[in-house]
Amino acid sequence: MSEIERLAKRFPPQFTWGVATAAFQIEGGANEDGRKPSIWDAFCRMPGRVFEGHTGDVACDHYHKWESDLDLIKSLGVDAYRFSIAWPRVIPDGRGQVNEAGLDFYDRLLDGLVSRGIKAFATLYHWDLPIILQGYGGWTNRDTADAFGEYARVVTRRLGDRLDTMATINEPWCATFLSHLEGAHAPGEKSIDAALAAAHVMNLAHGTAVQAARAERADLPMGIVLNSFSTYPGTDSPEDVAAANRYWQFNNGVFFSPIFKGCYDDEFFAALGDKLKVQEGDLERINQPLDWWGYNYYNPETVVNDPDPAAIFPATKGVPSSDSDLRTDIGWEIVPQGLPDMLKHVYANYDLPPVYITENGAAYNMGPENGVVDDQPRLDYMKAHITALSSAVEAGIPVKGYFAWSLMDNFEWAFGYSMRFGIVHVNYDTQERTIKKSGYFYKELVSKNHMISEELT
């Protein structure tokens, strides 16, 4: 039995294998058919915010190439496609008038998936907030949660009959902390008050959207996608262990606990709860029962205690997670064990539904040579992480699927087009797609798992 067959056999029959993208990163068509700008359209035009001033105006031109892109997905033999729906394309002003031409695009996309036998895993929000809502405070304004509920209702009513699952929000940590605390993502703010206000409003928006979607289609499996960090203390000292717990509460618990427990963690809330602006009934609205959740894993975090008396909660400092200097081209550590460690931790501490690994992948920037993209480091990364994931499956964690990030190279946010995560190479000048070595590896892995599934059924 080959190595790839052994790996495929470690996953159960009916395991879902997929590829993932996001609207702003691939669609382009930024000014077509009634779409209006998002906060990312504006952010791209702020000098110094995005690598070399790159924009999502054209991206991978998926808005026009969607049919051949679906054929490409079909050729990889995967079961499912995870994509996001662009709020500015559906309700361009964030609230009010629905843009039928925008919904028509997703109608065509879903019909194309159905005709090819590919499951549709949709995400309502992957960071492209309609810019008009930002003028009223964006995610720091509670009204945005209600607007998001209206958007969820419109999408579910029109498209829900062909969706296999729907996630409310992708990576709320990025859309709040990376965007409002660190200033690295749109809207580019650096304020802990704004970040925590946005975190609570986004939690509220999640619960509001679940209620709205279920009011339209009670049978649509609903979830949320989190990128919480596997968190390790730098040493076994009580100070560093406590620091790691604080880091967890601040970065991970701020979403996990209200969503799955209906509360914020005590130590975190005692330190910073006043900034969340929690109102009566909020936590009940946030704490909706979910059918599944998604986990995006790239790298862990290791922290030590920050002894500076002026340090605010969580009062931690980051240190390397391993002695290895191995990094992807984007500079992220490679620690496959962080994936099963995180899953085991959260299932031991929360009452959770089944999980899909909704993103996992690596940035490596090699291009075609004689028509071949030899991205062996990405292949090695995928193999190591899928192997690590299999240990979580074997430990009884209810893992239902794995989605490779990404289907194709695309607009990588503040890195523009300088970082390539795709298992398919994109020539941005010609829009030619070329399956990479990692893509062929993934195709073979999926095929072998399918063959095992057929033998067992």
Image: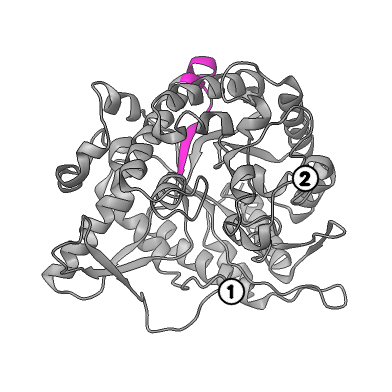
Residue 217, visible in the rendered structure: yes
Q: Which residue is mark 1?
A: 329
User: In the picture provided, is 371 more to the left or to the right than 46?
Assistant: right
- Placement of 453 over or under 328, stated as above or below: above
Please indicate whether residue 39 sits to the left or right of residue 276 in the image: right
Tell which of 259 and 173 is nearer to you. 173
Amino acid at circle 2: His
Q: Which residue is mark 2?
A: 62
Q: Which residues are magenta?
A: 212-225
Residue 298 versus residue 186 in the image, above or below: below
Circle 2 sits in a helix, a strand or a loop, which is it? helix
- In magenta stretch: residue 33: no
| Contact, mark 1 vs mark 2 (Cβ under 8 Å) | no
- Give the mark, 1 or 2, whose residue is nearer the N terminus: 2
As drawn, the residue found furthest toward the front would be 47
Looking at the image, which is closer to me, 158 or 443? 158
Label 1, label 2: how far apart the Cα atoms are: 25 Å
Structural crowding at the residue carrying mark 2, measured as other residues with C-alpha within 10 Å and reported as few (<14), some (14–19) or many (≥20): some
- State the image coordinates of residue 177 (x, y, percent, origin top left): 39, 49
**Which of these two is toward me, 318 or 407?**
318
In this image, 258 relative to 54: left or right? left
Q: Position of residue 432 (x, y in %)?
A: 85, 59
